[in-house]
């Protein structure tokens, strides 16, 4: 059997809007409550964004992050992974503000600029809970998520070199794996790499078993034995491709950032429900879920005592 499997839970994200599910955590209290419950259900890593408590709109405001980060740390031992992706409408400096203050053990890092198309999601709703929602989605029709080589280097310097933060390298297409291999060969990042294959976002590689195999083969060719991988599949592909990832020797990611669903046309009640489902699948396949302490050792993390929250 492979090493124990790391479950990442992406608690709220910046893709879905409050109209899409009443169960999406928005306020700091809701984010903290669902994050801790996800950890109790078996999540090893908690991937976190922040939202405006009044409107649910994604925000990079460090003050909002600091309303739930200490609470989560007090409530569980999970590894806290703060986004540097934020959303496509945020500048790099805005996206770095919270992790620069918090100095986390882990942070996500998108490995390239890309079209990030959320605009088709407008078709599912005719009435909206908040005025900002349809405009936010429509803006992705003519917007780009920007992470140039210089941007990525700045993240390395700001978080990696300064605070010892390690990264969840998010690869939305095979070209992003090539970019990651470049930085590895340049000696700018430390091994082992934790690589998140992201499938199913419009503008990136689509979600299919064939493409997951292609991503894995590409990473094997370019990264060798210097990495561990995890799989994030959007929407209805979340559970099938996570299961496939485990069979291939990888790790898994679930959470309401990536999918609002727990079954066919059935909204997940919370993040913990998704974590419990994938944990049950993993254990029935004969796998064991890694504890936070085990994952810290597997990924070479600095420890929860060296963060700033």
Image (spheres, helix red, strand yellow):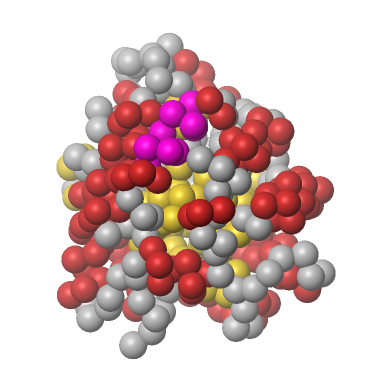
Residue at the image position 18 percent from the left and 75 percent from the top: 284
The answer to which quarter of the image holds residue 17 is: top left
Residue at the image position 41 percent from the left and 17 percent from the top: 55
Q: Position of residue 187 (x, y in %)?
A: 79, 70
Q: Position of residue 261 (x, y in %)?
A: 25, 45
Q: Nearer the viewer, residue 129 or 70?
A: 70
Residue 95 seen in the figure: no
Most common SS among magenta residues:
helix
Seen in the picture, residue 293 relative to 173 is either above or below; the reply is: below
Relative placement, left or right, of 309 versus 243 is: right
> Which residues fall within the magenta stretch?
64-72
Seen in the picture, residue 191 relative to 85 is either above or below; the reply is: below
Q: Nearer the viewer, residue 177 or 52?
A: 52
Residue at the image position 55 percent from the left and 48 percent from the top: 307
Seen in the picture, residue 199 relative to 47 is either above or below; the reply is: below
The answer to which quarter of the image holds residue 105 is: bottom right
Quarter that holds the N terminus: bottom left
Residue at the image position 34 percent from the left and 67 percent from the top: 291
Residue 240 on the magenta segment: no
Q: Position of residue 157 (x, y in %)?
A: 76, 51
Q: Nearer the viewer, residue 263 or 26?
A: 26
Q: Nearer the viewer, residue 116 or 253?
A: 253
Residue 277 seen in the figure: yes
For the image, the number of numbered tags is: 0
Q: Residue furthest bottom?
A: 1
């Amino acid at each position: 059997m492979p090493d124990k499997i790391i479950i990442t839970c992406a608690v709220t994200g910046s893709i879905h809007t409050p109209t899409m599910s009443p169960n999406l955590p928005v306020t700091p209290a809701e984010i903290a409550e669902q994050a801790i419950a996800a950890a109790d259900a078996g999540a090893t890593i908690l991937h976190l964004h922040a939202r405006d408590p009044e409107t649910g709109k994604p925000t990079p405001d460090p003050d909002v992050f600091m309303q739930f980060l200490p609470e989560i740390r007090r409530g569980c031992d999970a590894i806290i992974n703060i986004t540097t992706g934020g959303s496509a409408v945020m500048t790099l400096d805005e996206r770095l503000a919270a992790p620069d203050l918090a100095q986390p053990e882990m942070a996500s890092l998108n490995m390239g600029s890309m079209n990030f198309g959320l605009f088709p999601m407008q078709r599912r709703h005719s009435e909206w809970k908040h005025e900002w929602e349809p405009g936010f989605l429509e803006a992705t029709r003519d917007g780009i998520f920007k992470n140039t080589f210089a941007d990525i280097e700045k993240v390395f310097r700001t978080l990696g070199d300064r605070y010892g933060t390690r990264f969840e390298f998010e690869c939305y297409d095979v070209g992003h794996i090539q970019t990651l291999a470049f930085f590895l060969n340049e000696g700018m990042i430390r091994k082992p790499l934790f690589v998140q294959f992201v499938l199913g976002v419009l503008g990136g590689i689509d979600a299919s078993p064939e493409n997951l195999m292609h991503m894995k083969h590409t990473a094997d060719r370019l990264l060798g034995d210097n990495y561990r991988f995890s799989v994030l599949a959007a929407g209805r592909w979340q559970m099938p491709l996570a299961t496939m990832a485990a069979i291939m020797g990888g790790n898994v990611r679930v959470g309401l950032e990536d999918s609002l669903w727990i079954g066919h046309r059935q909204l997940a009640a919370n993040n913990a429900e998704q974590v419990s489902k994938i944990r049950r699948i993993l254990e029935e396949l004969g796998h064991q879920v890694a504890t936070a302490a085990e994952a810290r050792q597997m990924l070479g993390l600095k420890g929860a005592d060296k963060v700033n929250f």
